[in-house]
Structures are given as structure tokens and as C-alpha cells.
Amino acid sequence: MSALIAALTTRHGLPVVDAETLDTFLTPAAGEPQHALLFFTGDPDQRSDSGDVAVVLPELLAAFPGRYRAAVVARPAEAALKARCRVEVLPSLVVLRGASVLDVLPRIRDWSDYLDRLAAALRPDAPDYVAPSRIEITANARRADA
């Protein structure tokens, strides 16, 4: 774990969740916000933007005071939780209300994109997240004009 990611738990007090503790975390205690952010870090040695997201996460919580709770997903649990949280790219922040995934923000983003998307997820009528469609591009080895 990188020092920046470790600081999320040691300095900022974010819990680490895994498959056994995720549902408990997603159920807010009295007075806690309904909305949560999960940080899927990926391997920080292979994904340099994991550290960037780790720096941004506390700033996002400060930009939305009292509106979001956050946790770091334990690295060994990421593979098991990716499908449930609709994560395809690491690192990613997952926005949830209860167990409902409202948005997935892969990699590092522009600050305004974070603010817009997190504000949209707070709307009472925010829809569940639908992953973008994939377009497959293939190349044909034979060309008609050859």
C-alpha cells in the first residue's frame, strides 16, 4: 500500500472494507449520510493515478461536508467486489446510496467532473448507474481495394 493510500486510513480515519464488511459499511448508522464513496485503489505500483485519487478523496469529502462517507476497499477484496460495484477500471471511486451504485468514476478526473457527478448523485431521483456501452472496433485484414 502506498503512503498516500495508507494516509486515508491513518490520517483521515477512513475504514477499510472487504466482502464481509461492505454491507455493514453501506448501512449508515444514525446521523450518518446515506451516500458513500468506495475507493478501489488497484496496485499503486502499477497505477500511478491511485495516489492522485487518494489525495483528491479527502478534498471531495470536504467539498460535500456531511453528505458522503468513504472507505477504502481492501486490495485482496477488489476482485470479488468489482462486479457488484460495476468497476471495470482501477483506480475507481464508486458512488453509492445504500447498496445502489449511482456512479463509477474511473482514474483521476477533472475537479469539476468530480463535483458535478457527486452533486448529481445526491439528488433524490438520481438513477442507478448504467455502464457506458462498449463499441468494438475490428480491422479486416483483407481490403476490397487491394
Image (spheres, helix red, strand yellow):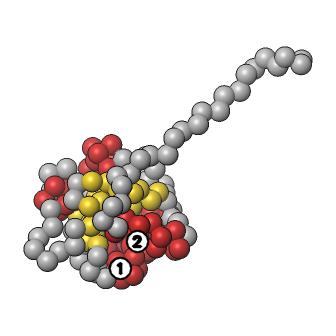
The quadrant in which residue 40 appears is bottom left
Crowd tier of the residue under label 2, counting other residues whose Cα lies within 10 Å: few below 14, some 14–19, many 20 or above: few
Q: In this view, does 59 lie to the left or right of 144?
A: left
Q: Position of residue 76 (x, y in %)?
A: 27, 50
What kind of residue is marked 1? Phe
Residues 14 and 28: in front is: 28
Task: Return the residue at label 1.
Answer: 64
On-image quarter of the N terminus: bottom left
Q: Is residue 72 visible?
A: no
Instruction: Identify residue for label 2.
Output: 119
Q: In this view, does 17 lie above or below 68?
A: above
The amino acid beneath tag 2 is: Ala
Q: What element carries label 2?
A: helix
* Residue displayed at 23% across by 54% down: 99
Q: Where is residue 69 in the image (x, y as percent from the top left)?
A: 26, 71
Indicate which disc residue 135 carries.
none
Q: Nearer the viewer, mark 1 or mark 2?
A: 2
Residue 138: percent from the left, percent from the top? 66, 28
The residue depicted at 52 percent of the width and 68 percent of the height is 113
| Between 67 and 74, the one nearer to me in the picture | 67
Residue in front for this viewpoint, 146 or 112: 112
Q: Can residue 77 be seen in this view?
A: yes
Secondary element at tag 1: loop
Judged left or right of residue 51, residue 81 is: left
Q: Are marks 1 and 2 in contact (CB under 8 Å)?
A: yes
Q: Is residue 22 above or below residue 66?
A: above
Q: Which quarter of the rendered picture does the C terminus lie within? A: top right
- Does residue 76 sit above or below 31 in this rendering? above
